[in-house]
Image (cartoon, grey):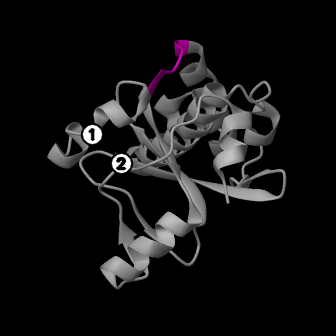
Amino acid sequence: MNKVLLNQLVYFKRVNIPKYIEANIQSIALKHLELSDMGKLRDRMEGQLYYSRLRDDIFSEYAFENLIGLRKFDWDKRTKKNYKRKKYVFENKILNLVLFMGDSLPKFSADHVGNCIFVHVNTDSRVLVSGLATKSMIDKMTVEQDSKIIEFADFKGLLEYNSMDELIMKME
């Protein structure tokens, strides 16, 4: 894990993903790939890459929704092969989840992100969810870095939240 990120783990909330979630994801991936089991993949690398992306995406959504106490996780939407995560909208306030993995720090386009929460997915089914970065924080970083592509490295200044209501109050 990146040293910058390691030094800031205290600013993240850790969410452990139950084992049954991974089994559900595997079933969805098999359905999307129209296979009865992963052993029947024609291209193992491509199939594994597809599964990994799907897994990381669902893990990030599940962890965030679980953390804020949002409704029961909607598995039906994920069974659709063409599903694309939409921005979360709470009381007309938009929120993006910015997913990042491995040793890299989150990078994103400031033009496409307003309020956001960063989600780091580990290979061991551990997910780290950051505090809230508001649109004004992102705009300030855009000016400071003089770039539309932001590499976020300081999680200390993000706003904490413990519920959906608290999160909504802090969003712009």
* Residue type at numbered disc 1: Gln
Whether residue 36 is visible: no
Tell me if 31 is positioned left or right of 5 in this view: right
Residue 55 in percent (x, y) is at 52, 37
Picture layout, residue 24 above or below residue 9? above
Question: Which residue appears at 50% of the width and 45% of the height?
Answer: 159
Quadrant where the C terminus is found in the figure:
bottom right
Q: Which residues are magenta?
A: 14-19
Sequence order check: which comes first, mark 2 or mark 1?
1
Residue projecting furthest to the left: 3
Give the spatial CA distance, label 2 vs label 1. Answer: 7 Å
* Residue type at numbered disc 2: Phe
Question: Which residue appears at 72% of the width and 49% of the height?
Answer: 81
Quadrant where the N terminus is found in the figure:
top left
Tell me if 29 is positioned left or right of 5 in this view: right
**Which of the 4 image quadrants contains residue 69?**
top right
Secondary structure of the residue carrying tag 1 is loop
**Which of the 4 image quadrants contains residue 135?**
bottom right
Tell me if 30 is positioned left or right of 98 in this view: right
Residue 23 in percent (x, y) is at 58, 20
Crowd around label 1: few <14 · some 14–19 · many ≥20 (10 Å)? some
Crowd around label 2: few <14 · some 14–19 · many ≥20 (10 Å)? many
Secondary structure of the residue carrying tag 2 is loop
Residue 161 in percent (x, y) is at 58, 35
- 2 and 1 marks in contact (CB < 8 Å): yes
Whether residue 114 is visible: yes
Q: Which residue is mark 1?
A: 8
Residue 71 in percent (x, y) is at 80, 27
Q: Which residue is mark 2?
A: 155
